[in-house]
C-alpha cells in the first residue's frame, strides 16, 4: 500500500469517560480522538468518524469505523510489535486515551427555562431539538482487542479454494499459479493491508521455492475470499503440486511491502497453506 496509511476498524469498542459520574442522559453519537498507549508510551493516534454510541454508567461503547492510523515519531518499533500481536494473538490489551466530541440527546430538563439543561460540569447551554454537543470529553481505558490469532491457527487462517489458471513454461521450468483463497479473521478488526508479497518456503526443508503476491488485501471480520498469484521456477514444487499436493509456508520479509510498518509486521509471521493436486492449463 505505497503512500497509504494503515487503517483500523472494529465492530465495537468501549472506553471509560472521565468526569461523567452520575450523568444519565443518552450520548447518541461520538467522534473520538484516540491515542494508543503501550505500557506508558504513546505509539500512535487516529481520529474516528462520527458513529452511533451507547452510554452505560461511564462506559461509552461505539463502533470503530475505518480510521487511518498515524504512528508517533520514534515509536515505529513499538507500533510494529502491536500490529504483530494483533495478527498473532487471539487478544491484545492496550490503553486507549484521548478526547471525544459527543452528541447528547436531552429532554426538557427542570431548569425552569425551556430549552435549557444542566450539563455534567454544572453549566447550562441551549438545547436545539433536544440535542447538545460537548467537545473535548476526556476518556482513558485499558481495552482488550480481539486479534486474528494466527499463532494458534497456523493451518486454518488461509484455506486454498480453487485455481483460476496454472501456466507452466516447460523450457524454463517457471510456472504461474493464480488461485483463490479464504482468509479467516475471527477478530472484530478490519485489517487493510493493501498490496504485499510473501516468500513461499517448502514446509520440510524451509528452502524458498516461490513468491506469492496479493493485491488490495482487506480482511474483514469473518471469512473473505481473495485472489493470489504464485510464481516459481522450482521443479520439485511443480512436481509436488501436480502429483500429490503439498504444504507451503508463507513467510514475510523486509521486501514484502513498500510500507515499513506492514513489512516489519510480516517478517515475524509464518502461515502454512495446504495445496491439493493441481492440473496445469492445457
Image (spheres, helix red, strand yellow):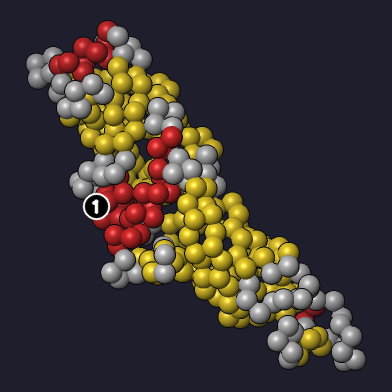
Q: Which residue is mark 1?
A: 258
Q: Position of residue 210 (x, y in %)?
A: 20, 29
Q: Quadrant of residue 280?
A: top left
At numbered mark 1, what does the secondary structure look like: helix, strand or loop? loop
Q: Position of residue 243 (x, y in %)?
A: 27, 7
Q: Residue at x 17, y 29 (%)?
A: 208
Q: Residue at x 59, y 51 (%)?
A: 11
Count all numbered tags in the image, as a single digit.
Answer: 1
In the image, farthest residue toward the top: 243
Q: Residue at x 22, y 43 (%)?
A: 253
Q: Position of residue 251 (x, y in %)?
A: 26, 36
Answer left or right for 114 relative to 248. right
Q: Choose between 49 and 44: the one closer to the eye.
A: 44
- Look at the picture and state if 63 lies above or below 209: below
Q: Quadrant of residue 39?
A: bottom left
Mark 1 Cα within 10 Å, few/some/many (few <14, many 20+)? some
Q: Position of residue 38 (x, y in %)?
A: 41, 63
* Residue 45 seen anywhere in this rendered image of the structure: no
Q: Residue at x 29, y 59 (%)?
A: 77
Q: Choose between 111 and 82: the one closer to the eye.
A: 82
Q: Choose between 14 and 108: the one closer to the eye.
A: 14
Amino acid at each position: 500500500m505505497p503512500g497509504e496509511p494503515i487503517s483500523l476498524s472494529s465492530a465495537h469498542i468501549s472506553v471509560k469517560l472521565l468526569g461523567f459520574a452520575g450523568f444519565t442522559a443518552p450520548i447518541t453519537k461520538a467522534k473520538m480522538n484516540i491515542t494508543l498507549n503501550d505500557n506508558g508510551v504513546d505509539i500512535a493516534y487516529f481520529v474516528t468518524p462520527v458513529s452511533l454510541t451507547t452510554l452505560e454508567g461511564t462506559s461509552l461503547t461505539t463502533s470503530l469505523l475505518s480510521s487511518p492510523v498515524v504512528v508517533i515519531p520514534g515509536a515505529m518499533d513499538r507500533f510494529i510489535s502491536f500490529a504483530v500481536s494483533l495478527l498473532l494473538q487471539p487478544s491484545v490489551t492496550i490503553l486507549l486515551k484521548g478526547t471525544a466530541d459527543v452528541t447528547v440527546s436531552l429532554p426538557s430538563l427542570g431548569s425552569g427555562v425551556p430549552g435549557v439543561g444542566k450539563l455534567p460540569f454544572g453549566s447550562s447551554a441551549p438545547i436545539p431539538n433536544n440535542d447538545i454537543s460537548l467537545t473535548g470529553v476526556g476518556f482513558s481505558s485499558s481495552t482488550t482487542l480481539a486479534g486474528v490469532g494466527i499463532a494458534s491457527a497456523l493451518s486454518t487462517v488461509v484455506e486454498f479454494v480453487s485455481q483460476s489458471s496454472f501456466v507452466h513454461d516447460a523450457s524454463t521450468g517457471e510456472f504461474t499459479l493464480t488461485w483463490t483463497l479464504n482468509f479467516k479473521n475471527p477478530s472484530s478488526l478490519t485489517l487493510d493491508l493493501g498490496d504485499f508479497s510473501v516468500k513461499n518456503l517448502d514446509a520440510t526443508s524451509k528452502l524458498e521455492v516461490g513468491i506469492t503476491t496479493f493485491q488490495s488485501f482487506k480482511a474483514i471480520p469473518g471469512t473473505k475470499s481473495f485472489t493470489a498469484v504464485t510464481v516459481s521456477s522450482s521443479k520439485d514444487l511443480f512436481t509436488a503440486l501436480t502429483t500429490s499436493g503439498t504444504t507451503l509456508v508463507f513467510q514475510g520479509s523486509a521486501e514484502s511491502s513498500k510500507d515499513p510498518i506492514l513489512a516489519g509486521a510480516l517478517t515475524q509471521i509464518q502461515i502454512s497453506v495446504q495445496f491439493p493436486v493441481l492440473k496445469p492449463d492445457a
